[in-house]
Amino acid sequence: MERVSTLERAIRTVLIVLVLVFFLFPIFWIVLMSFQNNDQILRIPPSILFEPTLANYTTLLTGKLQTTAGNLDIAFLKNLGNSLLLSTGSVILSLILGVPAAYAFARFKFRLGENIAFTLLSFRFAPPLLVLLPLSLYFKQLGLTDSYFGLIWIYQLICLPLILWIVRGYFEDVSPDIEHAYRVAGHSWWTTFRKIAIPLARPGIAAAGLLAFIFAWNNFVFALILASADKQPVTVGALAFVTASGIQYGQIAAAIVLSVMPTLLLALYAQRYLVEGLSLGAVKG
Amino acid sequence: MASLLLDNVTKIYRPRGKAPVEAVKRVTLDVKDGEIVALLGSSGCGKTSMLRMIAGFEDVTEGAIKIDGKEIHRLAPAERDVAMAFEGYSLYPPLKVRENIGFALLRQRGAGADIEARVKEVASLLEIGDILDRYPSLISAGQQQRTSLARALIRRAPVSLLDEPMSQLEPQLRAILRARLKDYLIAHKMTTVFVTHDQTEAVALADRIAVMEKGELQQFGTPDEIKTSPTNLFVASFIGEPPMNIFAGEVSPVSGGVAVRGFGPDGTSAFALKAPGLELDASRRVQIGIRPHLIRTGTGASDATGRVITNHWLGDQSHISFDIGGCTVVGVTDQPIAARAGDALPVGFPLRAIHLFDPETGNALAHGLDRAP
C-alpha cells in the first residue's frame, strides 16, 4: 500500500516537473537571453554562465538601437502603448456588445437565434489570412487603414465570439426565476439585468474578458497588414529588430519579456476566475 | 387586499419545430378579496403556468387577468404589485437570508427599523429566526424554501402567489407552518393563490380549491363541495385518500323503484343497492363511486359480503380491501378490525357514500343517493 503510493507520488512529481519544464523553460531561456548580448547568445555550446548586461533593456527604453550598420530608431514603448490601447479598447467594446448579446442568447429563444450565435462563433474558424485581403481593400475604401478605430473594430473578430459564448454559458447557469423574483419585487428589466444578472455572471465575464485580452494582445497578422509603424502593437513592432546588420536576439528577448509582462501579471492576478470561468462556462454550451 | 379575476385565460406554448401545447384552456377563476385559493392538480396540468401568467413571466395567449377590476396582464411584472414565492426558491446568492427577506421591502416606503421588525416577525413565523445571518448556499432546501416563502409573505402584497410553498418541509413542521401561514394570511387579509399537488395542504389552507387537469379547470369550490359533490370522475378520483372506489354499473328497475347495480370485471352483478329517491332512467349505464371512509363493515352492514384481501392498521385507521364479486373495494374504519385475508365480512354502502357518473362524459349524475335529487 505504502510502496504503491510512494511510487505513485514519485511518478506524479516527475510528470509535473516534465510539464513545468516543457512550458516554463522557453520563458526561462528568454529571460536569460534578455540579459545577454548577441555574441553570448549565439555561442556554441550555449551556457547559462555569462556576465549579465542591461544593454538590451536600455536600448528598448531609450529607443536608440546601435548596430554595426548604424543607429536605428525603434518605437518599442510606442508599440507597447499601442498594444495596451488596442487590446483594452477591443475588450471593453466587446464586453459592451457581447454581454447583453450573451444574455439575449441565453434567455430568449428568437428566430434564427442559434444561427446568429453560431455565425458569430464561426468568425473564429476562418483563418485570418483568408479575410485579410478583402478586409484591407474595404479598409482602404472606408479610410480605416492605419486607424485605432479600424484596428479595434477588427479585433472584435477575436474578442466578441469568445466573450459571447463563455458568458452565455454563465447566464444559462443562473435560474431565470432569480431575476423574476427581483422583477416581481418591483424592479424594471434593466435594473434586474444590472443588479442581478451581471453580478451573478461576473466570474464568467471576468474570465472571458481576460482571455479575450490575451488573444487580442497576441494577435499579429491583422495589425501587420492593416496598420503602419505608428499604430502597430508589440507583436509587429518586434520585427524592427530584424535589421540589416543581423537579428538582434538580445533586444527581441528583452522585448518579449516586457510585452509578456502585462498579460502574465493579469493572468496571475485573475487565475482563479480564469480556471473557474473556463471550466464552467465552456463546458456548458 | 384585492380581488383577482382570470377571465377566459388561455395559454398556448409554441415550441419551435414542435406542435403547439395548450397548457391552460379558457380558465375563468374569480378570487374574492382576502380569499385563499389553491390550484390543485397533478404535474403538468397548467397550474404553475397560471401562476406565472398572473405574475407576468408568461404572456396570456387569450383572455384577461384583472386585479381589482383593472386589467394587468399586459403590464410588466414590477407594475402588477404581486408577490411570489418560487418553486425553485430563487434566493439571491450574494445576500444573507435576512437581506433576502428584507430586500423586497426596500422598494416600499418604510423605515429601516420597520423592515427589521417585519423580517423578525415573518422569520419567527416560519422558524428561520436562527439562520438569518447565513447565506442561501449554506442552508438546507427546506430552509431555502421557507426563506423564499418569507420573502413573498413579508410584502403583504395585494395578491400573493405561492408555488408549492411547503413541498420540501418535513411533515410535522409542515402541519405547524400550515396553520401559522393561514393565520398570517387571514390576519393581513391577503388574497392568495397557491399551487400544490398535496390535497391535504389544499384542504387545510384554502377557502376554495380549483382542481385542474390537462389545462382545464375541473371544479372550483370549497373543500367540502369538492369532497361531497365532485363535478366529474376526475375530481372524484383525484380528491380523497385512499381514492374513491369506482365501478362500472347500471341503474336497474326493482319493485318499488330503482336500484344501483355494480358489475364485477366479468360483467356479472356484484352488488345491488336500492335507491328509492333516484330519478334516473332505469337500465341506464353509470359509473359508481364510493367513498372509502363511509363504507361500513361488520354488524349492521348487509349490502354485500366481501372477502378480505388485505387489512392494514395504520395507527389511527384501518385500510381494508375487499373482493366483492370480483370488484376490489377499499374501505376505511377508525377502529382496528380483527379480520385476516380470506375472511368473509358483511359490507355496508350507505347511500350518502354513493356518487353516480355518466360513463361517457364522466360528469356527475347524482351525489349521495339518500338525498332527493
Image (spheres, helix red, strand yellow):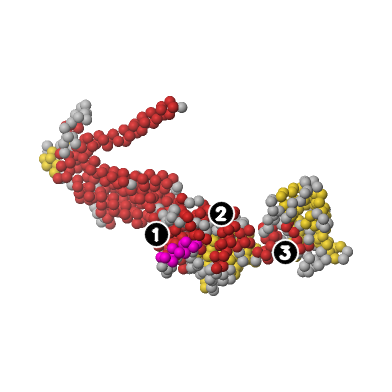
Label whose residue precedes the other's in the sequence (3 or 2): 2
Name the quadrant containing residue A47: top left
Chain to which the residue tagged by mark 1 belongs: A
Q: Considering only vertical position in the picture, is A27 above or below A270? A: above
Numbered range of the magenta stretch: B112-122
Of the two numbered discs 1 and 3 in the rendering, the one whose residue sits closer to the viewer:
1
Q: Nearer the viewer, residue B318 or A93?
A: B318
**Residue type highlighted by circle 1:** Lys
Say which residue label 1 marks: A195
Q: Is residue B161 visible?
A: yes
User: Same chain, marks 3 and 2?
Assistant: yes
Say which residue label 2 marks: B169
**Residue lying at 36% horizontally and 47% vertically, measured from the top left:** A273
Helix, strand or loop at label 2? It is loop
Q: CA distance from mark 3 to mark 2?
A: 36 Å
**Residue lying at 39% horizontally and 56% vertically, measured from the top left:** A198
**Residue type highlighted by circle 2:** Leu
Q: CA distance from mark 1 to mark 2?
A: 31 Å
Chain to which the residue tagged by mark 3 belongs: B
Q: Nearer the viewer, residue B244 or A218?
A: B244
**Residue type highlighted by circle 3:** Ala
Give how far across and how far down residue B358 sits, in percent: 74, 62
Say which residue label 3 marks: B364
Give how far across and how far down residue B161 sits, in percent: 53, 63
Task: Please give left or right for residue B371 compared with residue B221 in the image.
Answer: right
Of the two numbered discs 1 and 2 in the rendering, the one whose residue sits closer to the viewer:
2
Q: Considering only vertical position in the picture, is A221 above or below B30? A: above
Graded by Cα atoms within 10 Å as few (under 14), some (14 to 19) or many (20 or more), the crowding at tag 2 reads: some
Task: Please give left or right for residue B273 compared with residue A206 in the image.
Answer: right
User: Same chain, marks 1 and 2?
Assistant: no
Most distant residue in the bottom direction: B69
